[in-house]
Image (cartoon, grey):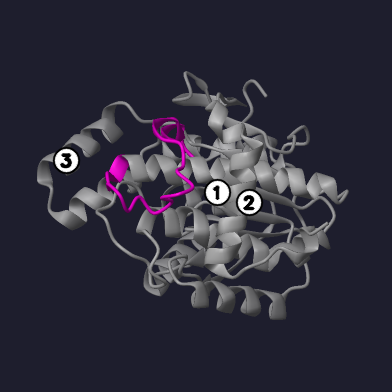
Amino acid sequence: MAGWNAHDIPDLSGRRAVVTGANSGIGYTTARALAGRRAHVVLACRDETRALRALDRLHAEVPDAQAEFIRLDLGDLQSIREFATTYSRAHDDLALLINNAGVMAVPQGRTKDGFETQFGINHLGHFALTGLLLPLLLATPGARVVSVSSTMHAAANIDIRDLGSEQKYRRWTAYGRSKTANLLFIHELARRLTAIGSEVVAAAAHPGYAATNLQTASPSQEGRKAAERFMRIGNRFFAQSAESGALPTLYAATAPDVRPDSFTGPAVMGWRGSPARSWRAPWSLDDRAGELLWEESERLTGVVYEELKR
């Protein structure tokens, strides 16, 4: 794992990959790297204008790229179902599902279906997407699901009685809970895949501190100039590049020695550097919490993983 970089990604000819939030930042960098190794990449994004601009850029940077855009709004269960239907009609396999998209530390709000925004987009949206695409993943040899979490998962465990942080909303606590949910989802998904004898690998990754628009998006939209300026200074002087931040995700998606329920991040204090095994909070490995979160996620989204029922 030491010194691993994008040049170590194997040839991905004939493999299809879906990358959520692929129009910018780590998502775009991930999609570009996969396309550069000959994967057929689907940019799954909410904003069509930005996605098509990213697609043009991808083709310019990787002239022989096989890439397409399919609209996906992770804050809208109907959009998620439409994405899965569109993809399944066009393709009968899926080798890589990269659950990358997310929002960070936004004001209290609701998705279209009434879920708290961060929990709804970061966890429930990807839970529903993965469940709807699961038949294709199970049918594809060597398939993987990679969810992008964060070291900020250590800021807060989930509260199964208050998943939407209704009792007292704090934006960073809600973000930490959503990132813990990402890890618990992978933990439980890996366990259930193993129980049915599936070889699909479910793993997690995090980018460390990478310079993307994730840090500045919320302050900018809210007009919090001081916070936006602080984030921009941090991105400029302390963060690693989006290219480096994408390496843990790319490693989890393509390296041959990745194990189910592994968590990969930057080697240097979880902040920057080559991909390495990452520390995770004990509560992100709690079997009972993972089971309860799974059951509640199926209830809330209406997406039931029938293929994993025993």
Q: Is residue 198 left or right of residue 229?
A: right
- Residue denoted by label 3: 227
Residue 30: assigned label: 1
Residue 100 position, x and y percent, is 51, 51
Q: Does 46 appear above or below 263?
A: below
Q: CA distance from mark 3 to mark 2?
A: 34 Å
Q: Are marks 2 and 1 in contact (CB under 8 Å)?
A: yes
Q: Nearer the viewer, residue 136 or 247?
A: 136
Describe the element under mark 1 as helix, strand or loop.
helix
Residue 197 position, x and y percent, is 88, 48
Kind of residue at disc 3: Ala
Q: Nearer the viewer, residue 103 or 305?
A: 305
Range of residues picked out in magenta: 149-172
The mark nearer the N terminus, 3 or 2, is 2
On the question of residue 42 being in view, the answer is no
Kind of residue at disc 1: Thr
Residue 34: assigned label: 2
Residue 168 position, x and y percent, is 27, 46
